[in-house]
Amino acid sequence: MGRVGRIVGEEAAKWGLVLDGTATAGLERYCRMIAEAGRALGLTARISEEELARYHVADALSCLLVMPECPEGAVVDIGSGAGLPGVVLKLARPRWEVLLVEAARKKAAFLEWVVRELDLRGATVVWERAEELARRPEYAGRCAWAVTRAVGPLEVVIGYAWPLLRAGGRLVAQKGPRVADELKDAERVLRVHGGRVLELREVRVGERRRVLVVLEKGKEFAVVRGID
């Protein structure tokens, strides 16, 4: 196990998450791929190997704390970028069906390379804006879970995720510690479109504090909009 694997494993262990050797090897290789191509594609800022492992990869793994072992349906990563958190979740949970949605062509091409090279069966890259994707019958109301990281305010993320989620589907939004103001606006949007805040889970990643916001889509929205 290399340095990246040790760092990710240590962070995951703090949360009671255990990674097998295959997942760890895949995550180490994925980190190398980001290091090789990421800067040229503008996928990440200039960061050290340790920062990449801890504050990007391990950070993405924290979503597992509020997600089931076997989601009953697809998981969509909206605005996937370099594949965070979608690729990381797929490597940790290889049986999951994961949609990696990315509007930028270069980033989508990078994700296609990652999926191909790491043989991520059941992972699909979709080069399209989330709001456009939801207009396609094969994606509208299909997903059981959505995940987002650094996409925008919660009220905006809800607008992207709700048309893709089935009734009762859930959204996990990774947020910083100052999420209170966003929650006020998000609750207003949820009252209008149907949904509720299920959980706020605070986690420590290294020295940083992260909040996992879990929202559930209500049935009223799905009926009114004819999605499900």
Image (spheres, grey):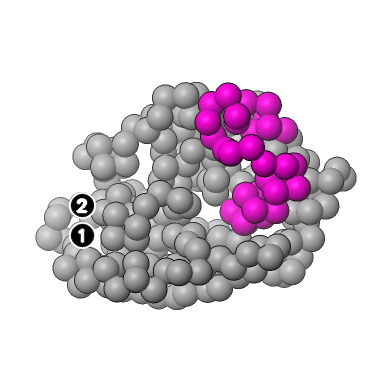
Secondary element under disc 1, as helix, strand or loop, is helix
**Three-letter amino acid code at the position of disc 1:** Ala
| Residue farthest front in this picture | 46
Mark carried by residue 54: none
Binning the other alpha carbons within 10 Å of mark 2 as few (below 14), some (14 to 19) or many (20 upward) gives: many
**Viewer-proximal residue, 92 or 204?**
204
| Residue farthest right in this picture | 1
Q: Is residue 32 above or below residue 189?
A: above
Where's residue 75, x and y in %? 46, 50
Q: Describe residue 211's horizontal placement relative to residue 181 as left or right.
A: right
Q: Describe residue 134's horizontal placement relative to residue 112 as left or right.
A: left
Where's residue 158, x and y in %? 30, 58
Main SS category, magenta section: helix
Mark 2 touching mark 1, by CB under 8 A?
Answer: yes
The answer to if 34 sits in the magenta stretch is yes
Secondary element under disc 2, as helix, strand or loop, is loop
> Would residue 206 be seen by someone viewing this image from the given angle?
yes
Give the residue number, with chain letter if any, for mark 2: 227
Where's residue 226, x and y in %? 15, 53
Q: Residue at x 74, y 42 (%)?
A: 49
Give the residues drawn in magenta, as a range. Answer: 32-60
Quadrant of the frame with the N terminus: top right
Which label's residue is closer to the chain start, 2 or 1? 1
Q: Is residue 118 above or below residue 224?
A: above
**Quadrant of residue 52 in the image?**
top right
Q: Residue at x 56, y 66 (%)?
A: 210
Q: CA distance from mark 2 to mark 1?
A: 5 Å
Mark carried by residue 222: 1
Q: Residue at x 53, y 26 (%)?
A: 41
Quadrant of the frame with the C terminus: bottom left
